[in-house]
Amino acid sequence: VTKLIEEFKDQDRYLYPNLKAKNEAKNIAEKFENEMGNLAKEFLNYKEKYNTYIKITESPINFKNETTKIMKALEDRMSREEKDLYTI
């Protein structure tokens, strides 16, 4: 989990700003940064909210729904980067 968070933070700090310097990638990098730049923060919030068994079992339906939501966001980000960004 820590490595995943660091990867997203590094992309937000280094990858997207560097890609913006290249005309071909600038629009895509700006769009991704605007749309997905808070994903690391959202994931950390999710992790803190459900970091114990008790927290999960207090509201299993919310846990399931929020897990589905964050996993979809992570999958979407990685898929979009693979398809639209890394091919430049």
Image (cartoon, rainbow, N blue to C red):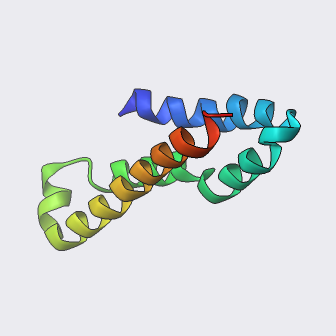
Q: Position of residue 42 (x, y in %)?
A: 48, 54
Q: Is residue 69 above or below residue 8?
A: below
Is residue 24 toward the left or the right of residue 37 in the image?
right
- The front one of 37 and 59 is 37
Is residue 2 toward the left or the right of residue 8 in the image?
left
Q: Position of residue 79 (x, y in %)?
A: 46, 46
Give the total of numbered labels: 0
Name the residue: 45% across, 53% down: 76
Q: Quadrant of the C terminus?
A: top right
Q: Quadrant of the N terminus?
A: top left
Q: Position of residue 83 (x, y in %)?
A: 54, 43
- The front one of 56 and 19 is 19
Q: Is residue 22 above or below residue 37?
A: above
Q: Is residue 60 above or below residue 36?
A: below
Name the residue: 52% across, 45% down: 40
- The front one of 41 and 36 is 36
**Which image quadrant is residue 60 in?**
bottom left
**Which image quadrant is residue 66 in?**
bottom left
Is residue 20 toward the left or the right of residue 41 in the image?
right
Name the residue: 72% across, 49% down: 28
